[in-house]
Image (tube, rainbow, N blue to C red):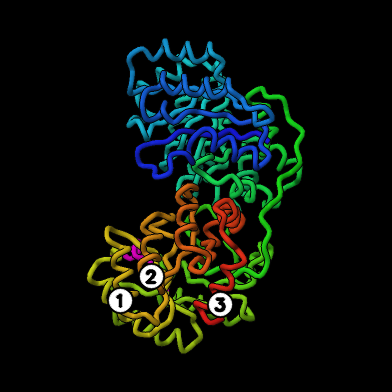
Amino acid sequence: MIDVNVLFGTFPRTAHPDEYALEAARAQLASHGITNALVCARSGAAFRHEVGNDDTFVAASADAAGGPRLLPVATINPAQNLGWRDELRRALAGGAVALRLFPDQQGWEYDSEAFHQLVAALDGRVPLLAPVTRFGDASRIGAATARIGRPVVLLGGHYTQLGDCLAALERWPHLHLETSRLGQFKGVETVTRLAGAERLLFGSGCPEKPIQAVLNAIMAARIPEATRRAILAGNAARLFGIALPDFPLPAATKATGLIDVHGHVGPIRFPTPPIEPSALPALMAEHGVTTTLASSIRAIMDDAPRGNADALEAARASNDALHAYVVVNPNDLEGSCRAMDRAYAAGAVGAKLHCQWSGQPTAAPATRALLQEVARRERPLKVHNDGPGWGAAIVEAARAYPRWKVIVAHGGPGTPDAEGAWTVEHADNVYLELATTAPDLPVVRDVVRRVGPDRLLLGTDVPLIDPAYVLGMYADAGADLARTAAVAREVFGL
């Protein structure tokens, strides 16, 4: 297999620097059977491009015996400016197989004259690796590089901006996409169907990102084996002139009897295929999940009464494969109390609170008042936290009601973090799950270690996130998947 997205090196905000180092990347690549990897040093993004390029060339020239072959990817920082043409010539003469950019870290834009001059100077000599973070980035990249004469690989395609990526891929045939953040529900199938299998390349983002998550997403996709092999190696071999390796297909994470405590019913406003609630149990069974606890996406984002009714109806029709949460909202305390009482009488297993969508941070007075009402009813709450001081607010509420159970969705505000682990450590009735498309693997591993197997639950965020992707992240983080089901039964009385 060929990984086109490996970025090694620490940075000041990391708590576990060794886990981002070159040796950590090399070990992860080898353990997942990856034989070739395009590597770039983070020092070129955060410090100076000539320093990063030196680090990259040293790494690529010091291949460990029997380990993956590392191919150097150079970088140029347009914001550094002085002498950049000389550095570009030096990097290309040194054997760089591609040029990688870091506009967000370095504070420059794709529509700048500096970027246009860099594209002209590159003159199509090597492919370009360009990250996309905002909707419109892919279009700006496509327009600026339309005459480059070489492929451009968009790094970090994600459901928040995939609509623009797909439109740009349709317009500009030199654009391609890699998989490191393509964790959305059926993301691999969506891209191959709309853009073509030859336009998608395997990239992991390791050692920061979990390799197994991406491999799972590729292996779970309903695509022909030839397409799978093209994504995993063939497309990169063609674009970067690498000898196509012979490789066995990787094994996907396998588990049985799982309980997913973070699911949804209903469609969402991103390029994810809608799935009927009646079809969700069969889909989850393919991933070893026998029971899914789900809230309504519409109840969170639009109409709570209608959405909550949809979730309850889906649960009633599922033969216990689905159980419903009732969505509550700090902006409507009385309505949320009525909704809980009705939903619990109708069989809902707990409440769901989304602080970000409601616009009320976890520590806000309105949210604290709602937490008390949820706690008084002693049904579990799964909460998507937001805002400063959220962990302390959850701990305070949980300690005040020790018979109540609280689940920290995503292990933190959108992705697992140290505050999520701290929250579990400081209240005996707080649990967490790890669903995210933005995992920082060393952080996730630390969270898993700190909370322990008895406080960790499985959450996938299906059908926003692909369950296969999440299971791979749990596997790479060293989580005990089988134990999460037992914990879920204890928390929810299933």
Is residue 222 part of the magenta span, yes or no?
no
What element does badge 1 sit on?
helix
Residue range corresponding to the magenta coloring: 352-360
Foreground pick, 283 / 471 = 471
Residue at the spot x=25%, y=72% of the render?
366
Q: Which mark is residue 489?
A: 3
Quarter of the view holding residue 299: bottom left
Q: Is residue 84 left or right of residue 175?
A: left
Q: Quadrant of residue 427?
A: bottom left
Task: Give the vertical position of 221 relative to 100 (above or below).
Answer: below
Report if residue 356 lies within the magenta region: yes
Few, some or many residues within 10 Å of mark 1 (<14, 14–19, 20+): many
Q: Calculate the distance from the C-alpha at mark 1 to the C-alpha at mark 3.
A: 25 Å
Mark 3: few, some, or many residues within 10 Å (few <14, many ≥20)? few
Secondary structure, mark 3, is helix
Secondary structure under the numbered disc 2 in the rendered image:
strand
Q: Estimate the spatial distance between the alpha carbons at disc 1 and disc 2, rounded to whole Å.
A: 9 Å
**Residue extending furthest bottom?**
345
Pointer 1 and pointer 2: residues touching (CB < 8 Å)? yes
Is 303 left or right of 238, judged from the image as shown?
Answer: left
Tell me the residue that label 1 is attached to: 370
Q: Is residue 466 visible?
A: no
Residue 353's disc number: 2
Q: Are marks 1 and 3 in contact (CB under 8 Å)?
A: no
- Residue 377 in sight here: yes
Whole-percent x and y of residue 63? 61, 25
Rendered residue at 30%/66% (across/down): 362
Q: Which quadrant of the figure has residue 332? A: bottom left
Question: From the viewer's perspective, is the residue at label 1 or at label 3 nearer?
Answer: 3
